[in-house]
């Protein structure tokens, strides 16, 4: 089967980013972390996960699993939304996007990337999206799921307008289990916080995006919800429909039920290979809207074993497996 990884990660470093920062930010000291940190030991004393900060590392990983290509998301950049300095966030996003062009996209056509956008400044984010796609060859962009924002807010309209104009997708990606805003900061152990964090963030953003009418206003825009699995999606579609049936007056932009927008063909979800409810998600969300994500090289990835887990499932047809492993990602990212 042709395999395209819809969500891999580059483990970028501050040293790499520093080379691509515009002045005067290039002189910023590297002695302290540039991105907010939460203190959790995700790699469990270094026993979990790997690093893939170079094109060679990623090409080797592709060959190991027999994948055709990957679409890369950041690691440090996942926490971009927690930066308070708006100008610094814009500068870091520009540096990251240039880094990905110079050290990954230019190296091999098998290495794709999405642009990192500063949610702190939607106008600047729209401008950076245009630069990243037209000048740097990015195939979409990432919006952080976590932070003190909801993506259905009107202030994000310039990003949606520009993405639809360019014909590229937006990936709503969970960032993690650290700072306030979702309640996960109250947990005493990482295992508890991480259980809830990604799913909670995605539920919040899907709710905001749908009820504020983003799919209605931008019907050609593809949006992917990544790294929280897909089994929650049918439950959340039903829950949104139930709320809408009682309080449609509070969602005046909508012209149909929330679940119909999710099923429309423009909203995607990444899956975990061993999800119990993967067949149900394929049926209730749509066979063309579920994509495979390796999550390599993060601490909780199971690549390349996850490929075999999907291939060996007895509750999916071969056609469905091919859609998950490659065809749907090709549609999502507009890959030839």
Image: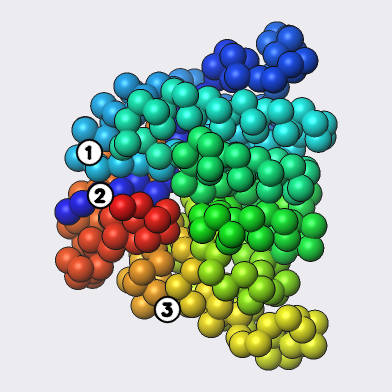
Write the residue at 61% across / 86% down. 257
Specify few, some or many for label 2: CA neighbours under 10 Å numbering under 14, 14-19, or 20 or more: many
Q: Are marks 2 and 1 in contact (CB under 8 Å)?
A: yes
Instruction: Report helix, strand or loop for mark 2.
Output: loop
Q: How many marks?
A: 3
Residue identified by numbered label 1 = 65
Mark in the foreground, 3 or 2: 2
Instruction: Report helix, strand or loop for mark 1.
Output: helix
- The residues bearing labels 2 and 1 have C-alpha atoms spaced at a distance of 9 Å
Residue 101 screen position, x and y as percent? 48, 30
* Sequence-first tag of 2 and 1: 2
Which is more toward the observer, 239 or 4?
4
Q: Are marks 3 and 2 in contact (CB under 8 Å)?
A: no
Question: Which residue is at the far bottom?
Answer: 245
Write the residue at 35% across / 26% down. 107
- Residue 284, which numbered label? 3
Residue 325, visible in the rendered structure: yes
Q: Quadrant of the N terminus?
A: bottom left
Q: Are marks 3 and 1 in contact (CB under 8 Å)?
A: no
Residue 321 screen position, x and y as percent? 24, 62
Write the residue at 35% across / 41% down. 70
Instruction: Report helix, strand or loop for mark 3.
Output: helix
* Image position of 6 (left or right of 250): left
Specify few, some or many for label 1: CA neighbours under 10 Å numbering under 14, 14-19, or 20 or more: some
Which is more toward the observer, 213 or 277?
213
* Image position of 311 (left or right of 141): left
- The residues bearing labels 3 and 2 have C-alpha atoms spaced at a distance of 23 Å
Residue identified by numbered label 2 = 3
């Amino acid at each position: 089967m042709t395999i395209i990884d819809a969500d891999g990660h580059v483990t970028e470093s501050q040293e790499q980013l520093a080379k691509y920062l515009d002045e005067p930010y290039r002189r910023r000291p590297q002695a302290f972390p540039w991105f907010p940190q939460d203190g959790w030991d995700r790699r469990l004393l270094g026993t979990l996960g790997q690093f893939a900060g170079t094109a060679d590392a990623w090409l080797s990983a592709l060959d190991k699993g027999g994948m055709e290509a990957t679409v890369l998301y950041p690691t440090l950049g996942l926490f971009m939304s927690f930066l308070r300095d708006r100008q610094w966030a814009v500068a870091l996003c520009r540096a990251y996007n240039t880094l990905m062009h110079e050290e990954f996209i230019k190296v091999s056509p098998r290495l794709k990337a999405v642009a990192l956008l500063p949610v702190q400044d939607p106008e600047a984010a729209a401008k950076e999206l245009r630069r990243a796609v037209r000048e740097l060859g990015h195939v979409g962009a990432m919006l952080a799921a976590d932070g003190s924002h909801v993506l259905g807010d009107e202030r994000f309209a310039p990003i949606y307008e520009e993405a639809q104009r360019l014909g590229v997708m937006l990936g709503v990606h969970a960032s993690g289990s650290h700072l306030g805003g979702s309640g996960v900061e109250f947990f005493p152990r990482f295992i508890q916080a991480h259980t809830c964090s990604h799913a909670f963030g995605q539920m919040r953003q899907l709710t905001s995006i749908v009820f504020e009418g983003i799919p209605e206003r931008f019907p050609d825009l593809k949006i992917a919800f990544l790294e929280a699995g897909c089994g929650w999606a049918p439950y959340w579609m039903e829950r949104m429909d139930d709320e809408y049936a009682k309080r449609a007056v509070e969602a005046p932009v909508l012209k149909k039920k929330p679940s119909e927008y999710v099923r429309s063909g423009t909203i995607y979800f990444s899956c975990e290979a061993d999800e119990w409810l993967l067949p149900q998600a394929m049926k209730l969300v749509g066979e063309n809207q579920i994509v495979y994500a390796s999550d390599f090289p993060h601490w909780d990835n199971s690549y390349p074993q996850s490929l075999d887990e999907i291939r060996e499932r007895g509750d999916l047809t071969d056609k469905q497996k091919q859609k998950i492993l490659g065809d749907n990602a090709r549609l999502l990212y507009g890959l030839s």
